[in-house]
């Protein structure tokens, strides 16, 4: 790590990582993503539309997601799906967060961080 590099704000990349994970299985619309994050983490991670939609729009601008408008029960919804670029981005983010989690766990347990675990 160079002198200018720092660790990301700990919660900053979490919504992006989890949204990409959710969209690997199926396409979803914004509010559905909000509910899935809450439900699948037993409300430990509960973010609202004000967090999810900017992340979705940013990922779409970066070509990690694509969207399509769909009418469901007379309501127009925008569904998001992951792209190959999004899958690569998820893999990179997942590796970063896994390494971070291992390092934190090592610190909490008093063990030495070992890159071999990651």
Image (spheres, helix red, strand yellow):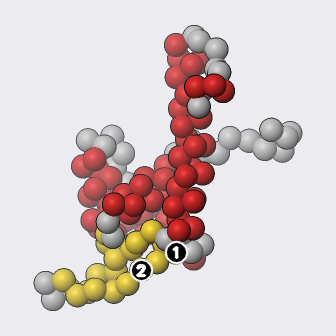
Name which residue lies at 52% across and 75% down: 60
- Dot 2 corresponds to which residue? 67
Dot 1 surroundings within 10 Å: few (below 14), some, or many (20 or more)?
A: some
Residue that sits furthest to the top in the current view: 110
Q: Residue furthest right?
A: 3
* Visible residue check, residue 27: yes
Badge 2 density bin: few <14, some 14–19, many ≥20, Cα 10 Å? some
- Is 70 left, or right, of 102 in this rendering? left
Image: 12 above or below 74: above
In the picture of the structure, the residue carrying the numbered disc 1 is 60
Q: Position of residue 115 (x, y in %)?
A: 66, 27
Residue drawn at (60%, 51%) of the image? 92
- Classify the position of the C terminus by image quarter: top right
Do the numbered discs 1 and 2 sit on residues whose CB atoms are within 8 Å? Answer: yes
Instruction: From the top left corner, tell me how far across and down residue 78 is, in percent.
Output: 34, 80
Residue 100 in sight in this render: no
Q: Give how far across and how far down residue 108 sits, in percent.
A: 53, 17
Mark 2 secondary-structure assignment: strand
Question: Between marks 1 and 2, how big is the CA–CA gap?
Answer: 8 Å
User: Residue 87, relative to residue 56: is it above or below?
Assistant: above
Q: Residue at x 59, y 12 (%)?
A: 111
Among the 4 quarters of the image, the one containing residue 45: top left
């Amino acid at each position: 790590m160079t002198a200018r590099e720092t660790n990301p704000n700990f919660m900053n990349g979490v919504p992006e990582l989890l949204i990409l994970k959710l969209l690997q299985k199926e396409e979803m619309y914004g509010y559905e993503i909000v509910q899935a994050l809450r439900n699948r983490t037993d409300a430990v991670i509960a973010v609202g539309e004000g967090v999810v939609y900017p992340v979705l729009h940013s990922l779409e601008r970066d070509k990690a997601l694509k969207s399509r408008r769909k009418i469901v029960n007379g309501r127009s919804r925008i569904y998001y799906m992951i792209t190959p670029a999004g899958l690569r981005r998820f893999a990179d983010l997942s590796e970063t967060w896994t390494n971070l989690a291992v390092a934190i766990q090592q610190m909490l347990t008093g063990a030495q961080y070992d890159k071999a675990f990651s």
